[in-house]
Amino acid sequence: MTDIIAPPSVRALAREKGIDLKKLASDLGRTNIVREDLDTKKTAAQHSPGGDTSYWNVDHAMYGPVSEEPLSRFAKAAAANLSAAQSLIPAVTHHEYASIDAVEDFRKELKPEAQARGIKLTALAFNVVALARCLEEFPRFNASLSADGQTLVLKQYVHIGIAVDTPHGLMVPVIRDADTKGLWQIAAEITDLATRAQKRQLGADQMGGASMTITNLGGIGGVGFTPIVNPPEVAILGFTRPEMTPVWDGESFQPKPRVSLDLSYDHRVINGADAARFCTRYSSLLSDPRRMVV
């Protein structure tokens, strides 16, 4: 079990009640402990993010051949955290399209320099830069709600989580201080962190503490999805595979690439109008990448 994530008030209450936070976290299958978890009167079923699931206990072999595959400890912790997020956070997803023809043209222009630097310059690097800019301009997206829901913690740093699909599960390494880094440095860090994630070589300093996470399905497919907010973050931004669409230029339709943006957010902190403004600004940054990276 990794370090326990709990605010000082929860740790103090745990000491008063004589509760071992590490044991509690192990029982719950997650590291994020909130005040409600310290209610010792709760049953195991109530502690489960999904509530009583005893009716799921079905002998599937009655209906045909089956095989069993035990979940890893990592997968169990991730499942518990996602279940808690889905159960406790009133999340909404805003869907938007962003034109990426300018980004693709700029990437082609920079290809010789990227090769000379030995750096793989992907569209994801531009998205990290755009997200860092938006988090500076929309501080409520760069925040976390306290466990008791009474205080909004506004962060003075911009750390971007990058969800990486690996054979041993989804991992989210973090680009620290993305607002202070240039395009080339961010591109290099994306490659390095993704490689380390695949090899399970990420250190504790490269995980956790993200302002917001990017989850990118562009290399696989899809036209849109609803990503689950990764607490204690209050929003997550997803992308799917770019598509070529006809755009009217005043005289004729021209083929232009665009990508779907899927922004899920905690409605306790962010309202729909702010989400729409956030995505509109994000889209405008991608439409003018030269100015964005200067």
Image: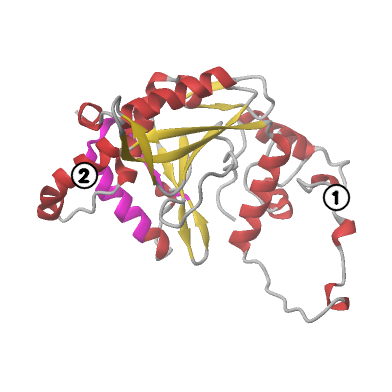
Residue ID at (61%, 60%) = 75
Residue ID at (39%, 61%) = 201
Mark 1 and mark 2 lie on one chain; the one further toward the N terminus is: 1
Residue 25 in the image, given as x and y percentages of width and height: 68, 49
Q: Is residue 40 magenta?
A: no
Count of numbered circles in the view: 2
State the extent of the magenta-drawn residues as a range.
172-195
Quarter of the C terminus within the rendering: top left
186 on left or right of 272: left
Residue 204 vs residue 89, the one in the foreground: 89
Residue ID at (37%, 38%) = 246
Residue position marked by numbered label 2 in the rendering: 107
Is disc 2 surrounded by few (<14), some (14 to 19) or many (20+) residues within 10 Å? Answer: some
Residue ID at (71%, 47%) = 20
Residue 131 in the image, given as x and y percentages of width and height: 38, 32
Is disc 1 surrounded by few (<14), some (14 to 19) or many (20+) residues within 10 Å? Answer: few
Q: Is residue 180 magenta?
A: yes
Residue 3 vs residue 176, the one in the foreground: 176
**Closer to viewer: mark 1 or mark 2:** 2
236 on left or right of 176: right
SS class, disc 2: helix
Task: Report the amino acid beneath label 1.
Answer: Ala
Residue 210, visible in the rendered structure: no
Disc sitting over residue 45 in the figure: 1
Disc sitting over residue 168 in the figure: none
